[in-house]
Amino acid sequence: MRGAVIEILRWGGGRKCRQAIKSLRNALLLLLVLMPLARGAEEVAHGLVRACSSIYPPPLEEVRYATTYNFTGHVLYPFPVVYLHRDAAAALQKVQEDLASQGLGLKVFDGYRPLPVQAKMWAIVPDERYVSDPLKSRGKHTRGTAVDVTLVDHLGNELPMPTGYDDFSEKAHRDSAKWSLEQRANNLKLEAVMQKHGFVPFPFEWWHYDLRGWENYPPLDISFEELARGVETAKPAD
Ligand SMILES: [Zn+2]
């Protein structure tokens, strides 16, 4: 044993050791560079994760609430990021894998929505078919378990769906008789894969799905800025 230690010490002082230390230092430097990238896939707060860095292949994101191009005409999110509860992201991962095998993928319009934003939307559209009453249900998107999605082909082109996103008309309802055969077929494809992996379709918006058991997740009042900082102090809404 003593001989082996002496041997290691002797080896440790040699050229091989300096090379090993250099390699180790380079590996550590590389790790430091990659760390901020990897961090995106970690949980940011209260079980929320960034969708694009948690799901592979990453879904396309079109966060219209970070622009004025939405039904309110106001910028509601400070930057275009989709946050989801880790359970919803895990289920969406399976959806994305399933779709990838068919040459398709998801485009995500919205995920977690802070409670004050929900209240702002409700003030503009006080109709529970399209926006949850924040005083009653405290919202569904506020739990990080709801997603607004559509299907895209391998080039990222949206497949024809019954209406555009956030079209608050009866044509967006799942029981609408106004859909073309192609729109119906595409919607059925989306519905089938989402249901298969644990999502429940919402009757009044073809794009909206809730993770099964969503009511067991608490509504959250954490801003996007707080999430971006990864704060651990923000509290669930009362
Ligand atoms: Zn929705």
Image (cartoon, rainbow, N blue to C red):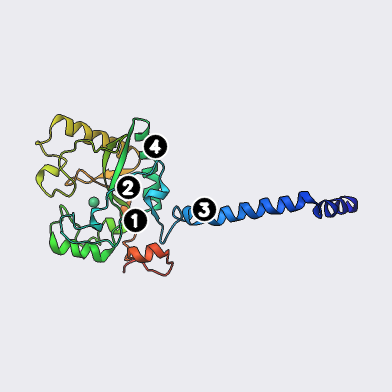
Query: Which badge, 2 or 4, comes first in the chain's sequence?
Result: 4
Q: CA distance from mark 2 to mark 1?
A: 9 Å
Q: Which mark is residue 216?
A: 1
Which residue appears at 62% of the width and 51% of the height?
27
Q: Which mark is residue 195?
A: none
Is label 1 or label 3 in front? Answer: 3
Callout 2 amino acid: Arg
Query: Which badge, 2 or 3, comes first in the chain's sequence?
Result: 3
Q: Where does the image place residue 43, in percent across and percent down from the top left?
A: 44, 57
- Residue that extends furthest to the front in the rendered view of this protein: 15
> Circle 2 sits in a helix, a strand or a loop, which is it?
loop
Residue density around tag 2, few if under 14, some if 14–19, many if 20 or more, within 10 Å: some
Query: Which badge, 4 or 3, comes first in the chain's sequence?
Result: 3
Above/below status of 92 relative to 238: above
Which residue appears at 20% of the width and 43% of the height?
206
Q: Which mark is residue 34?
A: 3
Callout 1 amino acid: Asn
Residue ID for mark 4: 97
Q: Do residues under tags 4 and 3 come within 8 Å of each other at their CB atoms?
A: no
> Circle 1 sits in a helix, a strand or a loop, which is it?
helix
Q: CA distance from mark 2 to mark 3?
A: 35 Å
Q: Is residue 135 left or right of residue 22?
A: left
Q: Is mark 3 within 8 Å of ligand 1?
A: no
